[in-house]
C-alpha cells in the first residue's frame, strides 16, 4: 500500500512539473505542498456524494493531475493545460469534470463550503464537505466570518484543511501578517483542531475521522512549499517561477 501511495503521489508531482514547464506557468510550489492531501482525499476518503472544494484555486494543476490519476480526466484533456481554448484554467474551474466550484480570489472557497455543509445538514444527509484553504487565506475576513458561521450552526460535517506551508505570494506568512498562535485562535471559534504533518498520508487520513460532536473540524497541515524537489522547497521564488530545461531534468530525477 505504501509503495502504491508513493507511486501515485510521485506521478502527480511529475505531471505538475511537466505541465508547468510546457506551459511556462507558475505556482509549482503551491501545487507540490498539497499533493499528499489531495491523494488522501481522492484515493482514501471521498465518497460518492461528498464534496471537495479547492479554495486555493491557484494550485489548480495539482487538482487536475490528481483527477487524471483518478481517471476522471483524460490524458488528452490534461495535455491541453496552458494552451489556447483549454478548459483547464490556471485557477480551478467548475467547467472541468470533477470540480465542484471555481476559485481564484482567496477567501471564496470556504464560504461556499460552509453553505454546502449547512445545506447537507438541513437535508439530513450524511455527506461530508471538505475544503482545502491556504495559509494566505487566513488574511481574509471571509475566512473568520465563515468559521463563526460554521461553529454557530454546529457543522460537524465540515472539514477545513489548511495548507500551512508558511509562504504566501512574495514573502513568508509571519512577515506579511503573523497568524500565530493559529491553533488557539481556531479553537476559540469552538472548532475541533488537529495539527498534522501534511505530507504524511496516515496522519492526514486519521485527522479526517468523523467525530459527530457538533463542531466544525479544522486540520492545520504543516507542509513544505515545493515539497519533493530540494531546490524548490521552502523558497518564495517557486510561487511564480517555472523551471528551465536543466531544472526540469534535475527535478524529474528527484521525483523517481
Image (tube, rainbow, N blue to C red):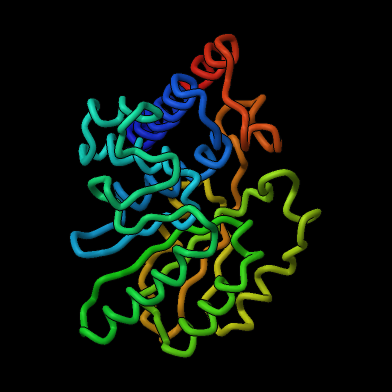
Note whether 54 is above or below 24 in the view shown.
below
Classify residue 3 by image quadrant. top left
Q: Nearer the viewer, residue 61 or 24?
A: 24
185 sits to left or right of 1: right
Which residue in the rendered view is the most extreme toward the bottom?
152
The percent position of residue 252, horizontal first and vertical second, equals 49, 17
Classify residue 85 by image quadrant. top left
The percent position of residue 29, horizontal first and vertical second, equals 58, 37
The residue under the point 39% across, 79% down is 156
The percent position of residue 201, horizontal first and vertical second, equals 44, 47
Q: Nearer the viewer, residue 203 or 165?
A: 165
70 sits to left or right of 115: left
Q: Quadrant of the C terminus?
A: top left
Which residue in the rendered view is the most extreme toward the left?
48
174 sits to left or right of 215: right
Note whether 97 is above or below 241 in the view shown.
below
151 sits to left or right of 53: right
Amino acid at each position: 500500500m505504501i509503495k502504491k501511495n508513493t507511486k501515485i503521489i510521485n506521478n502527480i508531482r511529475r505531471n505538475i512539473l511537466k505541465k508547468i514547464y510546457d506551459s511556462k506557468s507558475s505556482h509549482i510550489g503551491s501545487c507540490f505542498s498539497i499533493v499528499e492531501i489531495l491523494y488522501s482525499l481522492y484515493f482514501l476518503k471521498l465518497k460518492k456524494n461528498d464534496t471537495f472544494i479547492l479554495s486555493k484555486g491557484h494550485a489548480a494543476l495539482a487538482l487536475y493531475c490528481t483527477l487524471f490519476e483518478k481517471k476522471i480526466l483524460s490524458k488528452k484533456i490534461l495535455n491541453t493545460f496552458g494552451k489556447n481554448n483549454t478548459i483547464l484554467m490556471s485557477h480551478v474551474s467548475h467547467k472541468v469534470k470533477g470540480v465542484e466550484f471555481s476559485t481564484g480570489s482567496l477567501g471564496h472557497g470556504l464560504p461556499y463550503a460552509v453553505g454546502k455543509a449547512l445545506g447537507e445538514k438541513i437535508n439530513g444527509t450524511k455527506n461530508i464537505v471538505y475544503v482545502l484553504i491556504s495559509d494566505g487565506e487566513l488574511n481574509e475576513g471571509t475566512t473568520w466570518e465563515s468559521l463563526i458561521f460554521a461553529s454557530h450552526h454546529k457543522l460537524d460535517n465540515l472539514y477545513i484543511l489548511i495548507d500551512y506551508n508558511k509562504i504566501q505570494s512574495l514573502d513568508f506568512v509571519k512577515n506579511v501578517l503573523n497568524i500565530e498562535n493559529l491553533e488557539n485562535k481556531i479553537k476559540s471559534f469552538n472548532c475541533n483542531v488537529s495539527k498534522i504533518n501534511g505530507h504524511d498520508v496516515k496522519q492526514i487520513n486519521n485527522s479526517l475521522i468523523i467525530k459527530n460532536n457538533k463542531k466544525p473540524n479544522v486540520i492545520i497541515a504543516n507542509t513544505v512549499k515545493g515539497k519533493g524537489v530540494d531546490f524548490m522547497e521552502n523558497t518564495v521564488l517557486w510561487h511564480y517561477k517555472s523551471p528551465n530545461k536543466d531544472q526540469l531534468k534535475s527535478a524529474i530525477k528527484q521525483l523517481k
